[in-house]
Amino acid sequence: MANTPQAEKRIRRNDRRAAINKARVSRIRTYVKKVESAIEAGVQADAAAALQAAQPEMMRGVSKGVLHKNTVARKIARLAKRVKALA
């Protein structure tokens, strides 16, 4: 239980930020799933387009501090490798 007004405010702020960050991560996961489903379908053009849409979202997650930059770089590299293998 918070003992000071500032601690109460921090709890409220942390709850708001957690909701925003959760939505951001969920959005990124959705984009990644679209790329993976296109890869599974085997359509290289669709997979490449989905990857082009997913990359800015993933990098935005890095700039907002939701994901680590190396994690996103690794995921983008692995997805790009799988998309390239379809050709």
Image (spheres, helix red, strand yellow):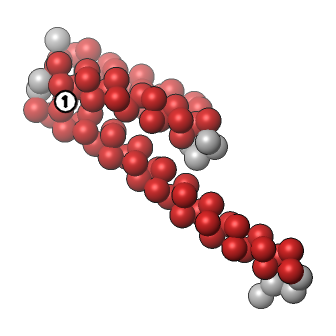
Question: Which residue corresponds to the image point at 68% horizontal and 66% vertical from the top-left?
Answer: 14
> Picture quarter containing residue 70?
top right
- Residue picked out by circle 1: 39
> Picture quarter containing residue 49?
top left
Density class for disc 1 (Cα within 10 Å; few <14, some 14-19, many ≥20) is: many
Task: Please state the horizontal and vertical placement of residue 78, each as a whole percent of the image.
Answer: 37, 26
Question: Which residue corresponds to the image point at 46% horizontal and 56% vertical from the top-left?
Answer: 23
Task: Please state the horizontal and vertical placement of residue 4, each as a whole percent of the image.
Answer: 89, 82
In this rendering, does residue 72 appear at all? no
> Picture quarter containing residue 55?
top left
Task: Please state the horizontal and vertical placement of residue 54, each as a whole percent of the image.
Answer: 37, 32
Task: Please state the horizontal and vertical placement of residue 3, each as a whole percent of the image.
Answer: 87, 86
Q: From the viewer's perspective, is residue 54 above or below residue 84? A: below
Question: Which residue corresponds to the image point at 25% horizontal and 39% vertical from the top-left?
Answer: 34
Quadrant of the image for the C terminus? top left
Quadrant of the image for the N terminus? bottom right
Q: From the viewer's perspective, is residue 87 above or below residue 35? A: above
Question: Which residue corresponds to the image point at 25% horizontal and 21% vertical from the top-left?
Answer: 48
